[in-house]
Image (spheres, rainbow, N blue to C red):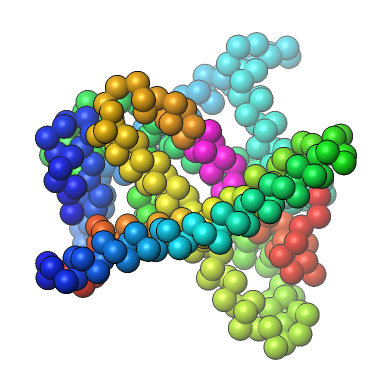
């Protein structure tokens, strides 16, 4: 459905549920999401490749920045997974953080509305439930991999751990984790864009800018939350005997 | 769309977001108050407390976001339309 009263103001146009459909074989995909996520991936790759091309012993410029980002995501993984076995999980957690962070900021910083599409509109890729559900399911898969590779089939003992009575709740947890992860990110980013669109409709100039700056902050927080929670789930699976808590 | 369905959907979307923000609002207030108290007692633990506070606030925020998702489904992807 199109909010029709928006449509006469070009920059405030807002469409929820309209997509640029691409048909690939039997599948129908949302083209605008793929385009923007490829841009996000290209952006991250460019910065990282340029920053690590000629490594110096004393980092400067872009290399300094890339090292800072690496240390930041290492810090997330270390805090949640623990000093002993966080290393193999830094790439996964870091990828999640960087992709979500760049996607969230892209939605706010790039003037997407100036590039018209035949249908749908370009926006942050994380405002589509398919992106966030994909990332969340990846995390579910990852903590199973973590638990099984660390403790073998003994990993499944956690389902009956304090007592077998809690088995249904423990099984349910595996479904609520990806559900809450994906809905949290999707809802937050979509809500940001809706709020900005409504504000632009009311006052097209200047007034939305502080709110957009606030949403830069919340976008960063959401990326941090997503990667922190993924790392916490992985850490919990690695550690066992935890029942939801983690020790840092 | 049937006018009764539209009216009920709009009303329930408003109720969904309003009611869903009640509980998490109270919870976030409690959490923030406790964190402030913690920082006042132990200013050297501020960084750790801030990190944990943000994570727990985001957990509570998620509950409101579920209400928002329900409201958005009712408004933009209504299954009964």
- Residue B81, position in %: x, y? 17, 69
Q: Quadrant of residue A74?
A: top right
Residue shown at 39% from the left, 63% from the top: B16
Of the pair B56 and A143, the residue shown nearer to us: B56
Relative to A45, A224 lies left or right:
right
Q: Quadrant of residue A223?
A: top right
Relative to B36, B70 lies left or right:
left
Residue shown at 46% from the left, 35% from the top: A215
In the image, residue A1 lies in the stretch drawn in magenta: no
Q: Quadrant of residue A10?
A: top left
Q: Is residue A45 above or below residue A169?
A: above
Q: Is residue A97 above or below residue A158?
A: above
Relative to B35, A225 lies left or right:
left
Residue shown at 62% from the left, 79% from the top: A169
- Residue A122, position in %: x, y? 27, 37
Of the pair B53 and A84, the residue shown nearer to us: B53
- Residue A211, position in %: x, y? 43, 31
Looking at the rendering, the stretch of residues picked out in magenta corresponds to: A217-227
**Label total for image:** 0
- Residue B14, position in %: x, y? 34, 59
Residue shown at 61% from the left, 20% from the top: A65
Q: Is residue A199 above or below residue B5?
A: above
Asked if residue B43 can be seen in this view, the reply is yes
**Quadrant of the image for the N terminus of chain A?**
bottom left
Asked if residue A133 can be seen in this view, the reply is no
Magenta region, main secondary structure: helix
């Amino acid at each position: 459905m199109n909010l029709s009263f928006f449509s006469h103001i070009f920059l405030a146009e807002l469409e929820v549920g309209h997509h640029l459909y691409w048909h690939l074989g039997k599948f129908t995909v949302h083209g605008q999401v793929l385009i923007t996520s490829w841009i996000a991936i290209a952006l991250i790759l460019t910065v990282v490749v340029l920053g690590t091309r000629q490594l110096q012993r004393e980092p400067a410029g872009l290399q300094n920045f890339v090292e800072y980002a690496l240390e930041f995501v290492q810090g997330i993984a270390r805090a949640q997974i623990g000093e002993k076995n966080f290393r193999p999980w830094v790439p996964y957690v870091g990828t999640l953080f960087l992709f979500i962070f760049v996607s969230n900021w892209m939605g706010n910083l790039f003037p997407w509305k100036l590039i018209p599409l035949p249908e749908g509109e370009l926006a942050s890729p994380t405002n589509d439930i398919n992106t966030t559900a994909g990332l969340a399911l990846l995390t579910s898969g990852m903590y199973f991999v973590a638990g099984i590779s660390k403790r073998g089939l003994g990993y499944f003992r956690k389902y009956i751990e304090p007592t077998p009575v809690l088995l249904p709740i423990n099984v349910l947890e595996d479904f609520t984790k990806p559900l809450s992860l994906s809905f949290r990110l999707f809802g937050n980013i979509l809500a940001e864009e809706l709020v900005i669109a409504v504000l632009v409709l009311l006052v097209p100039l200047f007034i939305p800018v502080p709110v957009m700056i606030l949403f830069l902050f919340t976008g960063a927080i959401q990326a941090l939350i997503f990667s922190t929670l993924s790392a916490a789930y992985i850490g919990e699976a690695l550690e066992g005997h935890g029942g939801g808590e983690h020790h840092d | 769309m049937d006018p009764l369905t539209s009216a009920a959907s709009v009303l329930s979307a408003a109720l969904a977001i309003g009611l869903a923000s009640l509980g998490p609002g109270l919870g976030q207030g409690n959490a923030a108050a406790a964190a402030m108290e913690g920082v006042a007692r132990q200013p050297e633990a501020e960084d750790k407390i801030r990190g944990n506070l943000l994570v727990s606030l985001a957990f509570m925020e998620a509950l409101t976001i579920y209400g928002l998702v329900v409201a958005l489904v009712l408004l933009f992807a209504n299954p009964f339309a």
